[in-house]
Image (cartoon, rainbow, N blue to C red):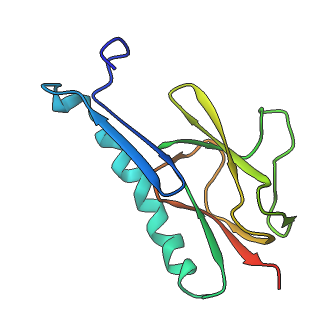
Amino acid sequence: MKELELVEIEVGLGSLTVRLKRPGAAPAALPVPMAPASTPAAGPVVDVGTNATVVTIEAPMVGTFYRASSPTAEPYVREGDVVKQGQVLCIIEAMKLMNEIESKAAGRIEKILVENGQPVEYGQPMFLIEPAG
């Protein structure tokens, strides 16, 4: 962490989350501008509650959301696509690592709540999936 000048790092996998903080690090290094990134999520959160049967896929980490593996590649999924459980939906880039985010349910993509290249916060809703009946 010291070598990369990191003050804090949080990694989540499923229900397990690990957070490391460097003692005595300057609080100014914490990314204050990330707070506005969670503001756009406030609108879609209202949509999440309108349909109790919808499965919400949330960001498992802080990073940058990408719909495709490269700028010239087709998106992994589009609204209306039918997906399988475990199918890759997007990539979140965190600390120069590309993390594939998989669907936790089979069904149809009802809504994509994040724009390509937009920063996401931990727990921010990214996709709404109508489960396969």
Quadrant for the N terminus, please.
top left
Count of picture labels: 0
Please state the horizontal and vertical placement of residue 99, each as a whole percent of the image: 63, 38
Q: In screen coordinates, is 114 left or right of 76? A: left
Q: In screen coordinates, is 112 left or right of 33? A: right
Task: State which quadrant residue 20 falls in.
Answer: top left
- Which of the pair 73/55 is nearer the observer? 55
Q: Is residue 124 above or below residue 26?
A: below
Q: Is residue 58 above or below residue 53?
A: above
Q: Give the residue at x 79% y 66%.
A: 79
Q: Is residue 33 above or below residue 44?
A: above
- Which of the pair 33/23 is nearer the observer? 23
Q: Is residue 127 above or below residue 9?
A: below
Q: Give the residue at x 56% y 46%.
A: 118
Task: State which quadrant residue 85 falls in.
Answer: bottom right
Please state the horizontal and vertical placement of residue 120, each as a whole percent of the image: 50, 49
Q: Give the residue at x 16% y 27%.
A: 23
Q: In screen coordinates, is 61 left or right of 86? A: left
- As drawn, the residue found furthest toward the top would be 3
